[in-house]
Amino acid sequence: MIFDNLDDFFSSGIKESKRSVIRELLKLINNPEIISFAGGLPSPEAFPIKEVQEICNDLIPKEGAYMMQYGATEGDPSLRKELIKIANKAGMDAEEHNLLITTASQQALDLVTKIFINRGDPIIVGIPTYLGGLQAFRSYGADIHGVTMDKEGESSVEIEKKLIELKKAGKKVKFIYVIPDFQNPSGITMSKRRRIEILELATKHEVFVIEDSPYRDLRYRGEHEPTIHSLDKERLVIQIGTFSKIFIPGFRIGWIFAHKTIIDKLTVAKQATDLCTPAFNQRIAAEYLRRGLLDVQIEKIKKIYSAKMNLMLSEFEKNMPKGVTWTEPDGGLFLLVTVPEHIDLEKEFQKAIDRKVAYVIGSAFTHDNSRKNTMRINFSYSSPEQIKEGVKRLADMIRSLI
Ligand SMILES: Cc1ncc(COP(=O)(O)O)c(C=O)c1O
C-alpha cells in the first residue's frame, strides 16, 4: 500500500518541515472566550473597507476584464510604478529591473531560498527570528546557524565568527537573514551602527543580506534608522516588503527590491510557483496608492496600535511578577517576554489556554528550538479591555509557575 510507505515518496525538504506552530495555535484559540495575544494579525477595525469598496466600484466596470485575467509575473505595471515612486521618495536607488511583486512576503522568502539554497548550504539568522522564515529555509534544507541578539540587533561579532568558521570548514554562507525594524518576534530595532557592521561583513565575506521589513512603517516613537538597502553600495541587500501589516493581509501582495540579476532569477522561480500574483488585488492596491490613501491609512493604524502598545506595556508593568522581563519596542506588533529559566512555556501552554489567554511560544522562533522560557505577545489585535484582562490572566499564570 502506497500510504504505508509514504516516507519513500516525500522529499527530504517536506519531511524535515513542520506545520507552523502559529497556524496550529490559531486553530486552538478559535474559542471566542480566549484572549489571544498569539497571532500577528492586524486589527480588523483598521481595514479600509469603504475605500476599497469605492475603488472596486470605480475600477471594475472599466478594467474588470484586465483585473480578472492572468497578469505579468513581474507584477501589475501600475503597482510597480507606484512602488518605485515610494522607494525613490524614501531615497532608495531602485529602477524597474530591481523590482519583483510577489504573493506577499512569505512567497518572497520562499523564492529567495529557492534560488540560493542547495541542501546543506549555510545561512545565518538571529536567535530568535521569524518563524515563517525558518519554515522557508528548512523546506529547502538550509543549514541554519543562529547568532544571539542584544538591544542593537543580531550580534555582528557572532556573525563574523560564524562566517570565518564556516569559510574555514570550506562552506559558503549564502545569506544573512535579518528583520531590522521592530523584529518579529522580539520587537527589537537594529541600530544604525549594527546595520553598517553587518553590511561591511557581508561585503568582506561576499554573502547576501536579506532585509525583511514588514513593520518598518509602523513606528510609534523615535526616529527611523536607515534601511540596510539604502546603506548598500554593492547591491548585496535583497529587501523584502509587504502590504500585509499596513494595508490588507488578505490581498497577499509583497515585493522584492534587489540587483537585476537576482530579480531575473526570482522571476523564473516565481513562474514555476504561481505564474503571477493576482492582478485584481494589485490593481486595487495601485489605485489605493495613486489616490494617496496609504499614507492616511498608515497614520490611522499607527494611532490605534501605539495606544495599544502603550497600554500593553503599562499593564505589564502593573501586573507582572518579579523575575519577568520584556522588550519595549518602538513600533511593530510584538514584544518578547522572558520568564525565569526553569519555566518551560511550551509545556505550560495548556495552562494558559485553561486560563483563556494565548501567546506564541518563543522556541518556535529559534532554529534550535531553544528559548523555551520566552513568549511572543501581540498587541495589535486585542481590544483595550482584552489587553487589560489578558495581561492579568497571563501574570496570574506566570506567578503560579514561579
Ligand atoms: C518578518 C516577517 N516576514 C514575513 C512575514 C509574512 O507576511 P506576509 O506573507 O503576509 O507578507 C511576516 C508575517 O508575520 C513577518 O513577520
Image: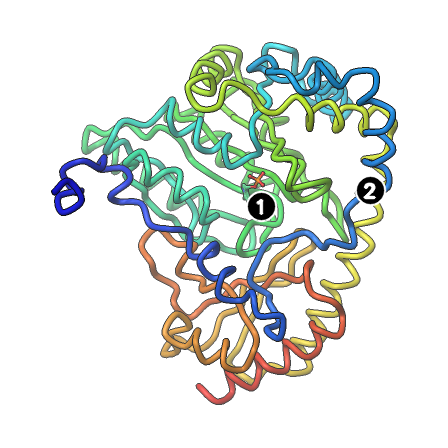
Mark 1 or mark 2: name the one nearer the start of the chain: 1
Q: Secondary structure at mark 2?
A: helix
Q: Quadrant of residue 307?
A: bottom right
On the image, numbered disc 1 is attached to which residue? 190
* Label placed on residue 297: 2
Q: Secondary structure at mark 1?
A: loop
The residue shown at (55%, 51%) is: 184
Q: Vertical placement of 251 versus 377: above or below?
A: above
Identify residue type, mark 2.
Answer: Gln
Residue 43: x and y in percent read 72, 55
Q: Vertical placement of 286 versus 315: above or below?
A: above
Residue 221: x and y in percent read 77, 53
Q: Quadrant of residue 100?
A: top right
Q: Quick one: 293 or 303, which is closer to the camera?
A: 293
Identify residue type, mark 1.
Answer: Met
Q: Quadrant of residue 317?
A: bottom right
